[in-house]
Image: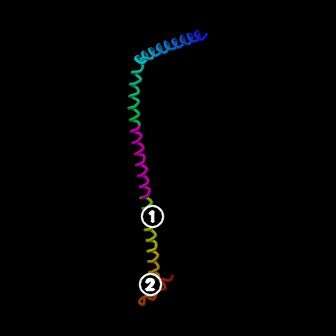
Amino acid sequence: NISATESSLDNKIEKRQQDLERNNKRLQTLRKVRPAFLEEFERLEVDLRRLYQDYIARFRCVAYLEQQLEDAELAEHDRIELRQAETRKMLEKMRQEEALKLLDDAFEPSSLYDPQTPSSLQTRLE
């Protein structure tokens, strides 16, 4: 009984080894054979890599140019704000100078009373 089981197991092992050898040979032949589409696939893969590199370069250029544009717009905005602030300061200074000049003219003693023309005070007050 044991010898029958042993021989049965030996047969199974031998059969499995033959299957393994046959499958290994088949694998080796499959590795040697190149499919018909593989050359086209490899060529397309090379083209795809080249196109992707072009895409990356262009994307980086566009991103750089967008950043430069944003920086330029920000600088221009700052310049405009600075000019507007300077203009407001200048206008305020001119208003203050004009108000001061009007006050000086209004309270200038010579303009209030002129001894040669007694009607100058009268005209000034009206």
What numbered label is drawn on residue 108? 2
The Cα atoms of the two marked residues, 1 and 2, are separated by 34 Å
> Most prominent secondary structure in the magenta stretch?
helix
Query: Residue 8 occupies which quadrant of the picture?
Result: top right
Measured as percent of width and height from the top left, residue 119 is found at 46, 87
Residue stretch rendered in magenta on the structure: 56-78
Dot 1 lies on which element?
helix
In front here: 124 or 31? Answer: 31
Between 52 and 1, the one nearer to me in the picture: 1
- 1 or 2: tag closer to the N-terminus: 1
Instruction: Report if residue 91 lies within the magenta region.
Output: no
Q: Which residue is mark 1?
A: 85
Q: Are marks 1 and 2 in contact (CB under 8 Å)?
A: no
Q: Reply above or below: 119 against 29.
A: below
Give yes or no for residue 77 being in the magenta stretch.
yes
Residue 30 in the image: x percent, y percent?
43, 16
Q: Nearer the viewer, mark 1 or mark 2?
A: 1
Residue displayed at 53% across by 12% down: 10
Instruction: State the residue at coordinates (51%, 12%).
Output: 14
